[in-house]
Amino acid sequence: MRAQRGLKDLCFRCADNPYARCAICGHQCPVHTRWPVGPVCLRCYRRTIAYPETCAACGDTKVLIALDATGARVCGSCANVSIDYTCRSCGHSGPQHYAGMCLRCSVVQATRLLITVDGTMRPELEQLPVILADRASRPQRCAG
């Protein structure tokens, strides 16, 4: 649910996104999310999530969603907020796809769930989740 109109719940598509100046690009746009840095448009949200950078406070490569007292960009942990884009499985910072996991770990998890019946995996299929995950995490290019 994104919002309510009266007693009706509205999804992301049906809810009206308020317009505001994006805290990252400075353009007047529909607000996609609000981070400690301020309102963020969809374009900046996607770019910031996809390309983690070095946090000015901790030095880790993370999704930077806030500013410190000097105006340097910092991660959620260093800004003392619970918003975090770190994979709970491998620790990689970036887009989350399934249950707080990055794309690679999500593919491994989903594949394991699909190819096991009783929690055990046939020996000849043990590498399949990793192979699929590695394939999914590489950008695909046209061979032509």
Image (cartoon, grey):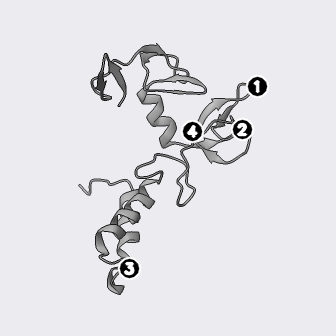
Rounded to the nearest whole Å, what is the CA distance between mark 3 and mark 2? 40 Å
Q: Secondary structure at mark 1?
A: loop
Which amino acid, by three-letter code, is at mark 3?
Glu
Q: Secondary structure at mark 3?
A: loop
Dot in front, 3 or 1: 3
Dot in front, 4 or 1: 4
Rounded to the nearest whole Å, what is the CA distance between mark 3 and mark 1? 49 Å
- The residue beneath circle 4 is 83
Rounded to the nearest whole Å, what is the CA distance between mark 3 and mark 4? 34 Å
Comes first in the chain, label 3 or label 2: 2
Asked if the residue under mark 2 is in contact with the one under mark 1, i.e. CB atoms within 8 Å, the reply is yes
Asked if the residue under mark 2 is in contact with the one under mark 3, i.e. CB atoms within 8 Å, the reply is no
Rounded to the nearest whole Å, what is the CA distance between mark 2 and mark 4? 17 Å
Taking the spot 29% from the left edge, 76% from the top edge, the residue there is: 117
Taking the spot 41% from the left edge, 58% from the top edge, the residue there is: 106
Image vertical order of residue 110 relative to residue 142, above or below: below
Which amino acid, by three-letter code, is at mark 2?
Ala
- The residue beneath circle 1 is 70
Where residue 108 appears, x then y in whole percent?
40, 65
Q: Give the quadrant of residue 23.
A: top right
